[in-house]
Image: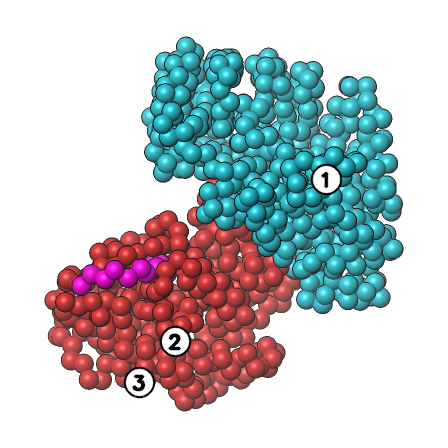
Chain colours: A cyan, B red
Amino acid sequence: MNINNDILNEIRQAAGENNVLQNLEEKIPYKNDASYMPGRIPELVIIPENSDQISRVLKLCTKYKIDVTVRSGGTSLTGSSVTNYNGIIINTMKMDKILELNIASRYVVCQPGVRLDNLNEYLNKYGFFYPPDPASSKASTVGGTISTNAGGLRAVRYGATKEWVLGTEFVTATGEIIRTGEYTLKRSAGYDLTALIIGSEGTLGVLTEAILKIEPLPEKYGRILSFYNDIYDVGSALSAVKNAGITPLIAEFMDLKTINSIRDKLNIKIPDYTQFMLMVDIDSTEASLKGKIENVEKIIKNYTKDVLTIMDQKTMDEIYKARKGAYSALLNQREKKNEIVIIGDVIVPASELPATLKEIKNAVDKMKINVSLFGHIGDGNIHANIFAENTKTGLEKVEKLQMEIAMAAIRHKGCVSAEHGIGTEKNKLLYEEYKERNSLYSLELMKRIKAVFDPENIMNRGKIFYD
Amino acid sequence: MTKNQILKITDECIKCGFCESVCPTLPAAGYNSIKGARGRIILAQFAINTGEELQISDSFYSCLDCFACLQVCPAGVNAGELSHLMKEEIAEKHINGNRVDIADMIKETILRFRNPLGLNRESAEWASSINFDESDTILFTGDMYQLMAYTKFINYVRKYFDRNLFNAFSRLISRHPDLIKLSRHFYDINMKVKMENNLRNIVRLLKMSGVKFNYLREDEDYPGMFLYDLGYINEFKKYANNVYNKLKKLNVKKIICIDPHTYDLMKNIYPEYIKNYDIEIYYYTDLINMNFEKTSEEITVQQPCHIVLHKNNYRALDILKKSANVKLNEPENLTSCCGGPDELLFPEIASEVSYKRYNNLKQTAGKIITICPLCYNNLSYDENVIDFSDFMIKLIK
């Protein structure tokens, strides 16, 4: 529905006069997020300060059937945080406070606009951290990462965001302010609404507060880099480490193109034959780390002769930062100026990784598309980064390849999205996944649940579900 | 040409939003994205590609030119440079529908008086009792220390003015530039005393280090920073060449700058616009060569963006480290803006940025040392904020 002057006045009153952007110039930046999915310029942008304002605005939006898209850091890679319809964007960035830290009970309470790196900078002062660590952690927020169930480099040890959210304050599309979960590590109390909100990508309402679990910082850790010319050996080396009962803090791999994009920042000697690099972090107590590292080195040396161990914190920080910036840095590897780099994101059980990678490589070779591979190999998460011309033909080829990759993941008991969410980029892939599993009714159930939270279907319409 | 440069930058951006996480103006502007680095890129791309008449000047003129965005962009996109190019497009009227009255006023007064406020005589008063050497090396103040007392007062008054009224006032001065000279009566007395003392401290530190140098007094021209920063590139080019030719006529071979903005301009920007530029540029802290007392005091340092983030080297931090217990808020090669560059056009943003920065620094150490008059002016919320020269002068053996 178009927002006429009367409705506009009501919204302004509900949101607070200074929290509404209505000039075209001010709304233009909200047509993009970090994805390549095209968004529209919203009719209004609301930047509320509290849940009451959000509640009042959502009540009006439900009443007048105004489409709503929720956004915070705007780092979505699947188009979750741009709008596809005439409607409003609610930007939660003004709600950027850390409200409470309780070390004894191991939780921190945050508003949705807190950026993950800022949260960890705060927690590190007390010797603690919040484990979910997507590569976008500098910009991504508590709200955004909960809404997409983000993962990241440390997921191999700590799992994705869903493992770390104890409870939320949440405003439903109808404007009801509810609390889900609470401050306790255990809770046996009916349906887990917190779990329902995690990964819902703003389709049910707006997250306004989160109770997050925290962990003590690892006492000490070291980084082992190893180099390969065959992807199969990368998978085998890591499997051997895990079979020895060792779960790394992180386990990342990258191909030569990715290595080249960050080579200057890695600042290490890379053997000439290298086609792939494996990066494994091992933690332990100060006293036993050396022995544990030597043990892992020995295992890895069965698969490659070149193993480099780094213990210096500054160097480790630089390499970690470079790895987190790999996706953006791949831009420098573009062959043509009008190319874009589209980051893929599928996951399979770790044991299925070598076979899946082989199938992905075959699909890439067959379609003659320029692709680079990196990912969180420890948890089976593959990012196939596709270099494509930003034209209709180019994007059609991308869509076709994305489907091939998704089908490979599905065949190997995996999922079409590991940590980026569905958005509009993957709603067709999600449909295919459930179709392949002969479980389309799961999607139907999701739609019915959405209708309970959002009876007028105003929240982030077009996301998750493929119509 | 400029439009192509702009599109080259915007097309390289993947809108990842990393820049927004460090852009000081975004939170200061209530997370209104057009006043953040990524929003500026998206807006510029839209404006150039569509040619639509849009009111976009606030977006680009609010950029602090601190280059914090560049430090975190994995693709190396410089949103600060983009803002500069967009200001150029706006100032040259290549993008319709935008007026920046205050900027126009500043341009007119600089071109008319070779000083933004027409205060050439007042700018040299601090040195009236100092004898300088006959030398082809000169101390070049860039008027920065001197202007702080006046800008502080202007901003104090501005809080009580409606923006439209201030714009109307600016248009009036643009038509009658002589009116700007009335500003000689309006300054913050404490800031004036402090800044003039700091200028004398700098001279003393240099003299004690054995540096021989002259000072042009009233003949020193404002270097034209505002013309460059506000996008008046054609005017800046002509103006900078005039400044340079005058210096050459006076047989100046070396220049000692005392603020990071003038230093960056004369060292890195002037050579782009002046053929065969051959004056050597130094930063005064690099010439200090003397022994200081050591103090056990904990200090933190507001490193200047125009030196640290624009990748210029300087020695001030080394000197401080030898004399005191320095605790930095961030790694040595990073810093965070004081908000100063927004002081005239967006005082509310400048104030938000500076207060946040002041609080961050204050949590780090009891004393905050500044190495730039703009940083000092913006961060001096209490007496524990001290100019480098003032701090070091008290440690002379």
| Mark 3 and mark 2 on one chain | yes
The reply to whether residue B327 is in sight is yes
Q: Which residues are magenta?
A: B293-307
Tag of residue B240: none
Identify the image quadrant of residue A466: top right
Q: What separation in Å lies between label 3 and label 2 (alpha carbons)?
A: 15 Å
A230 versus A340 height, above or below: above
Q: Which mark is residue B148?
A: 2
| Residue at image location 70% in from the left, 34% down from the top | A422
Around disc 3, counting alpha carbons within 10 Å, would you say few (fewer than 14), some (14 to 19), or many (20 or more)? few
Callout 3: residue from which chain?
B
Packing grade of label 1 (10 A; few <14, some 14-19, many >=20) is many
Instruction: Say what amino acid the circle numbered 1 marks.
Output: Thr
Amino acid type, callout 2 = Met
Name the residue tied to disc 3.
B121
Q: Which residue is at the front of the view, A269 or A144?
A: A144
The reply to whether label 2 and label 1 mark residues of one chain is no
Q: Nearer the viewer, residue B273 or B56?
A: B56
3 and 1 marks on the same chain: no
Residue A386, how many percent across, how many down? 58, 29
Using the rendered image of the protein, determine whether residue A86 is visible from the camera's viewpoint: no
What residue is pinned by disc 1?
A194
Give the left or right position of residue B10, taking residue A125 as reference.
Answer: right
